[in-house]
Image (cartoon, rainbow, N blue to C red):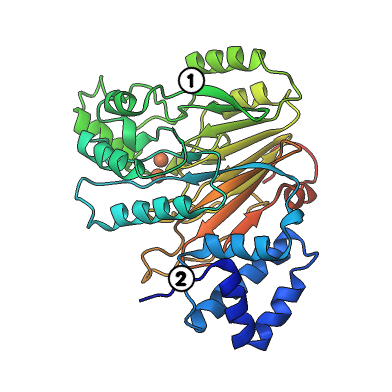
Amino acid sequence: MAKYFTPKELERELRERSPESERLIRSLHNCDRRHFLKVSAQFAAMAAAAGVIQPHGFQLVEMAYAATEPEKAPEVAFTFAYVSDTHLYARGMTHRFAKAVAKAVEDVNALDPQPDFVFYGGDLAQLGRADELELGRQILKDVKAPMKMMVGEHDWYFDMGEKWKEFFGPDRYSFDHKGVHFVTLNSVVEKDFWTAKGYTPEERMHIVAGLDDGRQSRFEVGEEQRAWLKDDLAKVNKKTPIVVFSHSPLYKYYEPWNFWTADAEQVQALLFPFQSVTVIHGHTHQLLTNRIKNISFHGMLSTAWPWPYAPTGLPKLTLQMDRPNPFDQFDGCGDGSVDVLKSGQADANYNLWDRSPVTVSYAELVKGIKGGGPSY
Ligand SMILES: [Fe+2]
Ligand SMILES: [Fe+2]
């Protein structure tokens, strides 16, 4: 049975067991976040080797930070966590995808302090069935922080979003939180490819769920929703930081797999006038970072499986993940959080299960910029 320690007890335990931990603890004084995260990962390995097990990596990170230098995070205004792309089948809690989302719920519930809210990034279900969505709803009910939901294509194309909306409300909405304007979009709208061909709802859903099934249309935000977005943003001061949630990336990454939003340029054009814009998206199941002019884009991790990178290459700002170990069902999967900075910009934190956590900081991101326009 694993023994759990309070942060102070853990620090004392590690100091006593290893002279190396003493050096690491000292090095945390006046360190930057990057060094802090690196040392946290070393702590995790040492704690595991010493038989001093923490419930999970997040608490260890929080512990080391709090124990050594609480005044070093003043630039963070608030944090929200995310869980995304769980792809549930209605096969109960014994199926590994259900276990994976339960693990993510445990992760976000153990965050201390708690995030302001937990954002769900879409593809809760695998085939859009009511029982799949219901299973997801039941598992997510255990999240302690307020939940915000977004739809993915796997939730939508069986009944065209009917059940999802009944459970979770509108598929597009905006809200203001601590001086930041948030917008959630349904970016997986497709042109009607099914009526003329006479596809059944099941066939339609299977076609959309097949990543490279050429019979479907491309995803788009669509004219009607762009008009809504334009109206919504018209009320917002250009200096107000904007965070947009979309399921597909709001740029053109790789068309054959629908890692693509067909009207991305038109949506971006509505966002260019704002001083600070961050887009957080699901769907791509991998560490993925891009920046186009004033817009930073971060892909969320999936709890179910990691997709490979597009064969044509990836945005040059992306910190590339190593190839996941096929014998480890959680490798390359995870959840994470986003620190919204006082400047309005954001740092994306990837809590990769079975790997060290990764932070893609805004400060590092802008250093990689070599001028405007698509960066790859
Ligand atoms: Fe997905
Ligand atoms: Fe998706």
Q: Nearer the viewer, residue 327 or 359?
A: 359
At label 2, counting other C-alpha atoms closer than 10 Å, the crowd grade (few under 14, some 14-19, many 20 or more) is: few
Q: Where residue 63 appears, x then y in whole percent?
A: 60, 63
In the displayed structure, 258 sits above or below 288; it is above
SS for dot 1: loop
Distance between the Cα atoms at labels 1 and 2? 50 Å
Name the residue located 68 percent from the left edge and 17 percent from the top edge: 236
**Residue 74 — which label?**
none
Quadrant position of ligand 2? top left
Name the residue tied to disc 1. Answer: 222
In the displayed structure, 45 sits above or below 55; it is below
SS for dot 2: loop
Residue 96 vs residue 104: left or right? left
- Identified by mark 1, the residue type is Gly
Q: Where residue 16 appears, x then y in whole percent?
A: 62, 86
Residue 43 vs residue 22: left or right? left
Q: Nearer the viewer, residue 3 or 195?
A: 3
The tag earlier along the polypeptide, 1 or 2, is 2
Name the residue located 76 percent from the left edge and 29 percent from the top edge: 275
- Identified by mark 2, the residue type is Tyr
Question: Cβ of disc 2 within 8 Å of ligand 1?
Answer: no
Residue 151 vs residue 61: left or right? left
**Residue 4 — which label?**
2
Q: Nearer the viewer, residue 21 or 299?
A: 21
Name the residue located 38 percent from the left edge and 69 percent from the top edge: 328
Q: The N terminus is located in which quarter?
A: bottom left
Name the residue located 20 percent from the left edge and 45 percent from the top edge: 90
The image quadrant that residue 99 belongs to is bottom left
Res 157 visible: yes
Q: Where residue 187 appears, x then y in whole percent?
A: 47, 29
Q: Nearer the viewer, residue 85 or 220?
A: 85
Res 313 visible: no
